[in-house]
Amino acid sequence: MTQSYSADAYRAHAAMQKLVLNQRDVRTAVTEATGVSFTRTRALRRLVHGPLRMSELAARLGWDKPYTTIVIDDLEQRGLVTRNVAPDDRRAKVVELTEQGQAVAQTALQILAEPAPGLAKLNAEELAVVAELLEKAAADEEG
């Protein structure tokens, strides 16, 4: 069953995209701050909460396994991750952040967590309403 959306839903979505994606180039900011491409920092960010099997990392990123291997090879050469044999299956590899990789991932996360500059145009009351409405919309997606 396909969801039907109102014109206002499309308008709201377009405004959110413009606010978040067009007001600042976060990809460039992340790359410049970390010295690692935005794509590679995506992999690092997925590993912040703990090690993952290569197959699980590929699935979470929506990448195929050969591409994931290329990315992890590069990150391993940079000293940002380690790759070890899974304790329960020697055919599987587990990827884990190094201390340096954790620092790079945290830098990227901090940049991505910064509010879009356009939000400064809103007063405290407007920001509270926007936050409440977006949290409501996001909760519907989770549930």
Image (spheres, grey):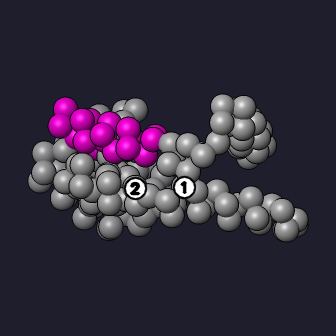
Going by the image, does 109 lie left or right of 31? right
> Label 1, on which residue?
20
Q: Secondary structure at mark 1?
A: helix
Going by the image, does 110 lie left or right of 131? left
Is 49 rendered above or below residue 29? above
**Is residue 99 among the parts visible in the rendering?**
yes
Question: Along the line of sight, which residue is nearer the eye, 56 or 134?
Answer: 134
Residue 48 picture location, percent across and down: 36, 36
What segment carries the magenta color? 95-114
Task: Please report whichever mark, 2 or 1, sits nearer to the chain's N-terminal start.
Answer: 1
Residue 129's label in the rendered image is: none
Rounded to the nearest whole Å, what is the CA distance between mark 2 and mark 1? 9 Å
Q: What is the three-letter code of the residue carrying label 2?
A: Val
Going by the image, does 82 lie left or right of 65? left
Magenta portion: prevailing SS class: helix
Q: What is the three-letter code of the residue carrying label 1?
A: Val
Residue lying at 51% horizontally and 64% vertically, measured from the top left: 22
- Circle 1 packing at 10 Å, graded few (<14), some (14-19), many (20+), is some
> Label 2, on which residue?
26
Is 11 rendered above or below residue 132? below
Question: Along the line of sight, which residue is nearer the eye, 37 or 96?
Answer: 37
Question: Along the line of sight, which residue is nearer the eye, 124 or 108?
Answer: 124
Going by the image, does 52 lie left or right of 91? right
- Circle 2 packing at 10 Å, graded few (<14), some (14-19), many (20+), is some
Question: Along the line of sight, which residue is nearer the eye, 5 or 96?
Answer: 5
Residue 69 picture location, percent across and down: 27, 61
Residue 110 magenta-drawn?
A: yes
Residue 36 picture location, percent across and down: 23, 55
**Is residue 51 among the parts visible in the rendering?**
no
Residue lying at 37% horizontally and 63% vertically, measured from the top left: 65
